Image: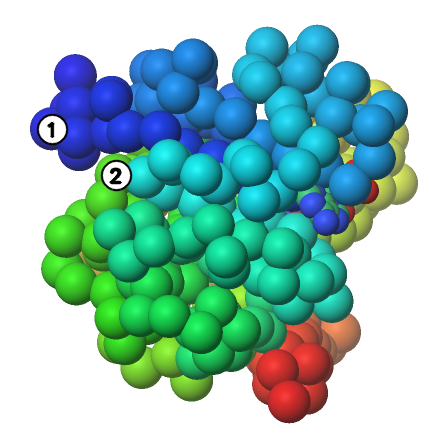
Amino acid sequence: MLKETKMLRDKKVAVIGVGKIGGTLVSGLLRNNVVRKENLAGSTAHAESNDEVAKRLGVKMLRDNATLVKGRDIIILAVKPQTIQKVLGEIKGSLNEDQLVITLAAARTTQFIEENLGKKIPVVRAMPNTPCLVNAGMTVLCPGKFAKPKHVEMSRSIFEPVGLVDVIDNEELMDGVTALSGSGPAYAYIIIEALAEGGVKVGLPRSLATKLAAQTLLGAAKMVMETGEHPAKLKDEVTTPAGTTIDGIMALEDGGIRVTLIKTVDRATEKSKELSK
Ligand SMILES: NC(=O)c1ccc[n+]([C@@H]2O[C@H](COP(=O)([O-])OP(=O)(O)OC[C@H]3O[C@@H](n4cnc5c(N)ncnc54)[C@H](OP(=O)(O)O)[C@@H]3O)[C@@H](O)[C@H]2O)c1
């Protein structure tokens, strides 16, 4: 077992909002034996979803957030940004400064969380993504003003079993992180889908075309991560003079793929900034 996963074995963890990303995290913590099932509990807004999650993930689900956080070492907030203030109001009376709050909400700063809690509670902001479900996530952490290095390490140990983790100090960068790796899986799925359509256009069966597109992106991503080479150099290695690839690249550039993707991240960053106001 990894050092960081051992660190959490006896910690009591609460997840408020076991929805898409909260559920992904809970299943990752269980799958990787990071937290004991009996030490993990959660909540959702509705009785039906509470029952469904309890059945699906086998964790204790409570209806009352104030009761849920009592005696928990780590509280993970995985509710929508527009719900977070209400939840903070529900739990602040039950929290003390020995507990750690990890917030996943996009566009909600650590200062916002700290002010709403009204105490010197350590807060770490985290931006994970859905590939945490297959242990290939990307999470960026940013500590608030009361979080100490041990709180960052504890947060790291939550996300490291389900993917890569980076820590930043400048919280303003979290809008760009949200736009790139938080939302990024959605962009990648569209690219995979479109490449597969290309395969279908030239006669490949759809299931084969989808597999070729997805595995090719996975392989290219691994090449970038594992060789440490610049993507442009790796691209040049595929592009034989007067070969097929350069014709494909010509069509890609003609469609403005680079500027489209730059604008994609830029627009999503602006939206995140707008939501934080
Ligand atoms: N999805 C992603 O890829 C992703 C990635 C990084 C960060 N995030 C952030 O994570 C947060 C959740 O996003 P999501 O996509 O997982 O949304 P989601 O699937 O809608 O999940 C939200 C969850 O919060 C629950 N909830 C609402 N009010 C609650 C309350 N008062 N007490 C307890 N639980 C409550 C909902 O319960 P019901 O189901 O009963 O309504 C639902 O389970 C957002 O702030 C988002 O910015 C998401």
Res. 173 image quadrant? bottom left
Which residue has dot 1 on it?
3
Tell me: residue 101, above or below residue 72: below
Residue 266 rendering spot, x and y as whole percentages? 61, 83
For this view, does 247 lie left or right of residue 156? right
Q: Residue at x 58, y 18 (%)?
A: 60
213 or 74, which lies in front? Answer: 74
Give the structural element (helix, strand or loop) at label 1. Answer: helix
Res. 226 image quadrant? top left
Give the structural element (helix, strand or loop) at label 2. Answer: helix
Which residue has dot 2 on it?
157
In this view of the protein, can residue 33 be seen by the observer? yes
For this view, does 145 lie left or right of residue 275? left
Res. 71 image quadrant? top left
Q: Residue at x 31, y 82 (%)?
A: 170
Q: How is the image coloured?
A: rainbow
Q: Residue at x 61, y 42 (%)?
A: 65
Residue 78 rendering spot, x and y as whole percentages? 59, 49
Tell me: residue 261, above or below residue 271: above
Tell me: residue 206, above or below residue 220: above
209 or 138, which lies in front? Answer: 138
- Residue type at tag 2: Ser
